[in-house]
């Protein structure tokens, strides 16, 4: 299921796969820290200096092994850490931040389940700490990303906010009282909340938002409707703007589905802001202006949240890992 | 709009109007406190003793005046307080708990808006404190009710929970980390979150849960479909059970709508429990068993919350007011 796909929210369908993240925000001064954002496709890694800048930031393919990838991932983290320490010998990390996809028990340091990683109840925090010889902060990738947006990005200044990453899938995280609200790892599944009776979602439920309105779903639905393989959701949106009826219908229904979810969030949780990142957020006004207008039309007395663009999209998880690691140093 | 109807969640459509609340939980030992639960139809009031039992609990009609009812309500509170103090002269209240419907800014002590009370930005806390000569704790009625359920009722033991009151309307409140989450009064509007494209809701939005699945909506929809005035939602459910096709369709669609909302809540907020009170909760297994089954069918990897019955339904708001008032004594 896409929630267990590390790339779920953060894969940039508008960028060539494997592109180097184009912007790396600094995390500010503090102890040097190693940061890892482990996904099903690749591992992002970097060494953050005392000034807070990232050294050696790279994406490497996540090791492909059948079944449980825990051991292979720990091996990969060790190799990456050794390489960073050797390359930047004068920057001595004091701690590690490690974020992973799936259901994550941050308190216990356990990856509870992540379908595309194959693990179940994997004690990743302790395994990494033993192998790297440093204290490890361990968290869910999107929760860490929301923390980075809160500290450094689009969610700055909002105590109660939703961070939504719309890419191949749709991932979400809640910030409540200025800190991530995780509910033992189960909160924030906005992509896997039902908005209709269909279609079936990869997660096994039906009518999930992700199955209708993710960048991946928009592209897939266009292909299914027309037999034409679009260049991602961006292409479908562009076709919708120039009179392609099938594209317009798919884009319109995606906007309606997103609006319904945002309206639900607004009514129940009343966030001050909804921060949207991921590939689809690069649609800019075509997305944000439409969502603002439709959200106002759908609601009445409710307090409409600000809809703002995420600022760290591609690197939010890694930056969150670094921030969390710093807390242990 | 129903959210501004004090009776929205708490009116018991299965009981004759004006019936004395059948059960009053004690709030435990502490300072004596006056408690008021102000609604559009009636005001519940009582004096709670140092042992925590309610004296003189009654419902009196809320004064009917055109426009802003603030002054008339303050007059009524004074009269009720004078009467309680005179009747139970040996119980000396140290503080007051006052809860009201609508959008409530508990921090500022202000009733921001409540359509059926006619007020806008009414400084109710300070007005009541000046008139009653005691410190006043001021809160939203359903938020206070959720606090009472958390301390004394069905939400005991759950840090993260939703309290849902399904009566004439549908009111809700979130408990996060063991305390009410209010978002400046805008959170918890589960009854006014959209679940479909229709019908139009009294709040001005369309497709609100309340317009489809409240006890009031179930009875109204049955009347609209058949021309037969049912004896409340309970009657519609009973007819559904005995083969009335129109009743079965309406009850089924109400359950589907409730399930969709609970599924959304589960995916995004992942509460440990959803506590359901109000008239419809008296349908018992016909409601709870159906919701449990349908919720499991709608979701996949999600953590399914416990669905439990509220325990204080009719008096939760008043008990919450008393508990909040005690905090000031």
Image (spheres, coloured by chain):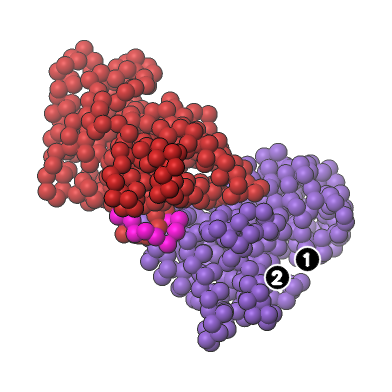
Chain colours: A purple, B red
Left or right relative to A147: residue B192: left
Give residue B86's position: percent from left, percent from top: 14, 18
Which of the labelled discs sits on residue A21, or is there none? Answer: 2
Residue contact at pointers 1 and 2, CB within 8 angstroms? yes
Q: Residue at x 34, y 14 (%)?
A: B51
Instruction: Pick whichever, A50 or A327, lies toward us.
Output: A327
- Which of the pair B254/B175 is nearer the observer? B254
User: Magenta stretch?
Assistant: B194-203
Q: Is residue A186 left or right of residue B110?
A: right
| Front one among A145 and A51 | A145
Q: Is residue B92 magenta?
A: no
- Chain letter of the residue carrying label 2: A
Q: Secondary structure at mark 1?
A: strand
Q: Is residue A181 visible?
A: no
Is B72 on the left or on the right of B285, as rendered?
A: left
User: Which residue ends up furthest to the front in the rendered image?
Assistant: B243
Residue B289 spot, x, y in % from top left: 53, 36
Chain of the residue where label 1 is placed in the rendered structure:
A
The kind of secondary structure the magenta stretch mainly shows is loop
Within 10 Å of disc 1 (Cα), the crowding (few <14, some 14-19, many 20+) is some
* Quadrant housing residue B152: top left
The Cα–Cα distance between marks 1 and 2, rounded to whole angstroms, is: 9 Å
Q: Please report the residue visible at 49 percent of the width from the left and 28 percent of the height from the top.
A: B156
Q: Residue at x 15, y 30 (%)?
A: B78
Q: Indicate yes or no whether the magenta region holds residue B196.
A: yes
**Pointer 1 residue:** A59
């Amino acid at each position: 299921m896409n929630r267990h796909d590390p790339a779920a929210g953060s894969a940039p369908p508008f960028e060539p796969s494997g592109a180097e993240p184009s912007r790396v925000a600094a995390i500010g001064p503090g102890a040097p820290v190693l940061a890892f954002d482990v996904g099903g496709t690749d591992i992002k890694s970097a060494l953050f200096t005392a000034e807070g800048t990232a050294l050696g930031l790279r994406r490497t393919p996540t090791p492909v092994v059948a079944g449980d990838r825990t051991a292979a991932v720990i091996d990969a983290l060790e190799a990456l850490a050794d390489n960073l320490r050797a390359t930047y010998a004068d920057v001595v990390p004091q701690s590690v931040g490690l974020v992973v996809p799936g259901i994550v028990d941050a308190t216990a340091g356990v990856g509870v389940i992540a379908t595309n990683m194959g693990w179940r109840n994997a004690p990743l925090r302790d395994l990494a700490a033993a192998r790297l010889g440093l204290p490890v902060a361990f968290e869910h990738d999107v929760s860490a990303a929301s923390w980075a947006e809160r500290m450094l990005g689009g969610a700055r200044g909002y105590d109660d906010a939703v961070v939504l990453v719309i890419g191949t899938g749709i991932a979400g995280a809640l910030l409540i009282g200025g800190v991530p609200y995780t509910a033992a790892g189960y909160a924030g599944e906005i992509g896997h909340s039902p908005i209709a009776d269909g279609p079936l979602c990869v997660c096994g439920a039906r009518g999930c938002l992700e199955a209708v309105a993710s960048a991946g779903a928009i592209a897939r639905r266009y292909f299914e409707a027309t037999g034409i393989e679009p260049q991602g959701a961006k292409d479908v949106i562009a076709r919708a703007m120039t009179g392609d009826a099938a594209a317009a219908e798919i884009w319109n229904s995606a906007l309606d589905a997103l609006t319904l979810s945002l309206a639900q969030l607004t009514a129940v949780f009343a966030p001050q802001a909804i921060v949207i990142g991921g590939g689809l957020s690069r649609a800019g006004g075509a997305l944000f202006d439409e969502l603002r207008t439709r959200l106002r039309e759908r609601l009445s007395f409710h307090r409409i949240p600000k809809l703002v663009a995420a600022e760290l999209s591609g690197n939010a998880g890694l930056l969150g890992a670094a921030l969390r690691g710093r807390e242990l140093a």
